[in-house]
Amino acid sequence: MTIPTALIIDDEPDIRELLEITLGRMNLQTRSACNVKEAYQWLAREPFALCLTDMRLPDGTGLDIIEFVQKNYSQMPIAMITAYGCVETATHALKAGAFDFITKPVDLVRLRELVNSALRLREPNVPAQITEGPLLGQSRPMQKLREKIDKLARSQAPVYISGESGSGKELVARQIHLQSARAKQPFIPVNCGAIPAELMESEFFGHKKGSFTGASEDKPGLFQAAHGGTLFLDEVADLPLSMQVKLLRALQEKAIRPVGSQQEQVVDVRILSATHKNLANEVAAERFRQDLYYRLNVIELAVPPLRERPEDIGLLSESILQRLSAGGPPVHLHAEALNKLQGYRFSGNVRELENMLERAYTLAEGEFIHADDLQFQQAVLHKTSDNSVANAAPEPAAMPAAQPRERVDNLEDHLEDIERKLITQALEETRWNRTAAAERLGLSFRSLRYRLKKLGID
């Protein structure tokens, strides 16, 4: 088996020697260069598994080497060695294509983790096949998106995934993880808007036993759970400002301090983040810290809305219907229904398409979903490029005065409870004869079967 070789570029002999000894103990061969010219000569002479370069060199910078490597040896991971606290320099290096960065004085534990991550990129890694969800499609926007994912999967740089609600931002994050050197490690998604503010620090960083009332034992946080893998911060704009400060420190130091602990713990986590809000506008409104914004938004990846790729709707629809009809007779989309869907501007993107097909599946008879089976959310207004309004409903008539109603905290759960009671009642009245119960409820047998599965009624 060929022993990997690493190229070390630094003009300080002590740093070169430290890196040579450390990598040698990891069973790597090393070659060293003290300037840009010598580094280029080594690169032309033999192949390398990875490269470590200092930022400041006598005849150039590490950024020059990164750009040269990206142009001529793009498959070789290269990491930048920067002075402590030079976040801006590290950010420039990541934007230029660096795999990762490490600060001086060099932390040997962190260095070994970086090297191991870089070497894992050499292992044969078959990208996970995308068989369902928003990343299906052969349109040009989706081809570009997949190309960017392939490139970003080889980096450790933080990625900010922008896109509208329902466009598939979490699936994009998951795909970056699955195609990366971290694929065998955890992928931990977290909805930042769903964590109560008073529990946020404990959820992210963990806590020690007795650190607050109710802390009966040590508990690891999300950062510890994602160690070695990827932490996906969904709806990151919903983080309170107090938590943004703590998150920024964790990202800069690559270490966290559990609540109630005096010791910091080093964590090796790649951060991916997303929100449906315009994060730059949140910064302008002083609801989001500018320094955290630049730390998260090293590379931005935009997920195209569904209305920009209508040619993908057919493939997406067939995948969704195949999942819905699993275990039963297959159901397909009629050509007229497909034309109707392709002419609709989805404000909720793929999630709205899924919900629409789910409703149509329960109502449709036979093996096809027809245009009349589709129910569009006509109340949703969507501005087109010429400021006209698409998918607009006629002006509604005046509504009667509102009547007192029962308080409902969660409409979906409330409706499911009502549906569960009615279906259970019909089944009991027909002695659990599903065909008879479906007739009593005015449903098709397939529709009842789908609802039983959805509601968990055996």
Image (cartoon, rainbow, N blue to C red):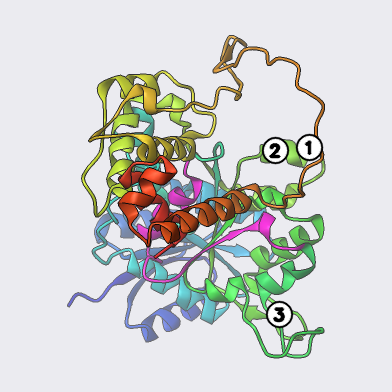
Amino acid at the residue labelled 1: Ala
| Residue 74 visible in rendering | no
Give the residues drawn in magenta, as a range: 167-196
Quarter occupied by the N terminus:
bottom left
Mark 3, other Cα within 10 Å: few <14 / some 14–19 / many ≥20: many
Which residue appears at 33% of the width and 36% of the height?
A: 317
Compare marks 2 and 3 and give the one earlier in the sequence. 3
Which residue appears at 46% of the width and 28% of the height?
A: 375
317 is higher (above) or lower (below) than 457 = above
According to the image, label 2 marks what residue? 280
Mark 2 element type:
helix
| Residue 68 visible in rendering | yes
Residue 258 — which label?
3
Residue 284 — which label?
1
Residue 395: x %, y % from top left: 67, 13
Alpha carbon distance from label 1 to label 2: 6 Å
Asked which quadrant contains residue 38, the reply is bottom left
Callout 1–callout 2 Cβ contact below 8 Å: yes
As rendered, which of 213 and 366 lies closer to the eye?
366
As rendered, which of 124 and 309 lies closer to the eye?
309
Residue 5: x %, y % from top left: 30, 71
Mark 3 element type:
loop
